[in-house]
């Protein structure tokens, strides 16, 4: 790759990222190109963000049209795209109100604030505990790190926000015990643990979590940051489980590549926030909302059927393939346990023009929802080749 760029990046950018040796100059759909014109099939979509791939025409037109009108107003004024997007989100989910922000972590912060404020006003301020799951991931701010049930994320940044507990997934007795013994405001779960290794929760467990929280009048929040916006073959992952959360957060794919996060508040929480209770300067930015409105309106039944069809293709191609131990996930959110270390598989794929991700010890695929089937097949055959080689 371009080593001048690599050196400048290493010199001036804080060392938080171990980047792959690829410099991305441009893209079209599910193809990306580096500065030497090398082509890559993109199976990562910027960690599940570019829902319709790179430089999608319709999305680009929606975004540039809004850019030409007004790019930012602050939340002191009304803007159309923000209200239109909130309306569509509520219509598609049955939720009642939306708070817009700029990222997944910030959406979870908003969700936690809504839950604590509600529980405090209904049950008392001591009802502040947020229960999450072991091996979860909820973000990088101090509060969402506290929510993240993985100790190694916590070590460098003590003290974290207090009031968080995590219990093992699939262990209903552990959850019931915590709900009995602690003053809990909300339980927050990912239906599929993404960063944790693409591990779907079982339907019986998710239903039990819903039942236990309802019985105790404890809120159930779902982190749909990665699983949301069509990724799993339903608009939001909880819709695969036949449950209704009290509130949920989303981000990643919603903006199609522009930063936007949202907290969706159900009936109980529809009036939880009043003026001044929460806010964000950039939240609900009209350009991001115009992009998101285009994305959300295109995640319809026919696209979701396509996602499920491509998911079946991925699972049937990889399950039992040489060098593949197991395949997990849902829709176009797939984890692959390979015989070779995941990092080695990803590196070999890069050399052959396929970009994939890792999650823990797995190879992770999060392709664009509209990846053309021929490109997907080509990328999968390269991935299979790489996995099969000794
Ligand atoms: C990516 C992710 C986050 C954090 O989102 P950011 O936009 O990076 O702040 C939170 N929760 C889940 C489940 C995620 O996958």
Image (spheres, helix red, strand yellow):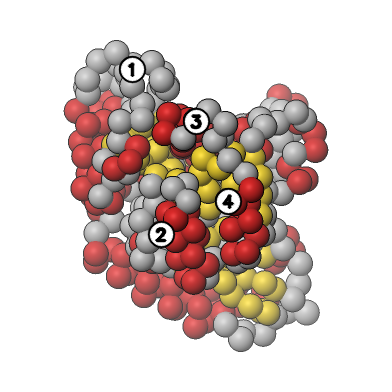
Q: Nearer the viewer, residue 382 or 179?
A: 179
Instruction: Give the SS element for disc 2.
Output: helix
Instruction: Give the SS element for disc 4.
Output: helix
The residue where tag 2 is placed is: 238
Q: Residues within 10 Å of mark 4 (few under 14, many from 20)?
A: many
Q: Nearer the viewer, residue 280 or 32?
A: 280
Of marks 1 and 2, which one's residue comes earlier in the chain? 2
Instruction: Residue 248: give x, y in percent of width and height.
Output: 41, 45
The residue where tag 3 is placed is: 124
Going 28% across and 56% down the picture, which residue do you hit?
Answer: 299
Instruction: Residue 107: give x, y in percent of width and height.
Output: 46, 36
Going 71% across and 24% down the picture, which residue do you hit?
Answer: 12
Which of the two discs, 3 and 2, sits closer to the camera? 3
Q: CA distance from mark 1 to mark 3?
A: 21 Å
Instruction: Give the SS element for disc 1.
Output: loop
Going 68% across and 79% down the picture, which residue do you hit?
Answer: 325
């Amino acid at each position: 790759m371009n080593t001048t760029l690599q050196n400048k990046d290493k010199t001036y950018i804080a060392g938080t990222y171990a980047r792959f040796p690829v410099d991305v100059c441009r893209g079209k759909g599910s193809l990306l190109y580096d500065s030497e014109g090398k082509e890559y099939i993109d199976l990562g979509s910027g960690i599940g963000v570019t829902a319709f791939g790179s430089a999608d025409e319709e999305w680009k037109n929606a975004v540039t049209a809004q850019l030409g009108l007004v790019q930012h107003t602050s939340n002191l004024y009304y803007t159309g795209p923000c209200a239109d997007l909130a309306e569509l989100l509520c219509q598609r989910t049955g939720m009642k109100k939306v708070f817009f922000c700029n990222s997944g972590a910030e959406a979870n912060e908003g969700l936690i604030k809504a839950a604590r404020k509600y529980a405090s006003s209904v049950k008392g301020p001591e009802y502040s505990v947020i229960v999450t799951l072991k091996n979860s991931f909820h973000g990088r701010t101090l509060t969402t790190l506290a929510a993240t049930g993985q100790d190694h994320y916590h070590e460098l940044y003590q003290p974290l926000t207090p009031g968080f507990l995590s219990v093992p997934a699939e262990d209903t007795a552990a959850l019931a015990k915590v709900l009995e013994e602690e003053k809990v405001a909300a339980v927050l779960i990912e239906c599929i643990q993404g960063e944790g290794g693409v591990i779907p929760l079982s339907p019986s467990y998710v239903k039990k979590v819903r039942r236990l929280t309802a019985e105790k009048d404890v809120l159930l929040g779902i982190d749909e940051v990665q699983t949301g916006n069509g990724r799993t073959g339903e608009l939001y992952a909880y819709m695969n489980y036949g449950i209704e959360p009290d509130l949920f957060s989303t981000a990643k794919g919603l903006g199609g590549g522009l930063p936007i996060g949202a907290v969706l508040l159900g009936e109980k929480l529809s009036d939880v926030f009043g003026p001044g209770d929460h806010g964000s300067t950039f939240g609900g930015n009209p350009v991001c909302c115009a992009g998101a409105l285009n994305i959300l309106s295109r995640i319809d039944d026919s696209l979701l059927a396509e996602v499920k069809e491509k998911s079946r293709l991925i699972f049937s191609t990889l399950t039992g393939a040489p060098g593949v131990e197991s395949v997990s996930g849902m829709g176009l959110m797939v984890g692959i346990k390979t015989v070779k270390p995941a990092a080695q598989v990803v590196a070999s794929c890069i050399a052959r023009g396929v970009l994939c991700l890792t999650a823990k010890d797995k190879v992770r695929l999060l392709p664009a929802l509209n990846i053309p089937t021929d490109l997907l097949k080509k990328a999968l055959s390269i991935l299979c080749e790489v996995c099969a080689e000794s």
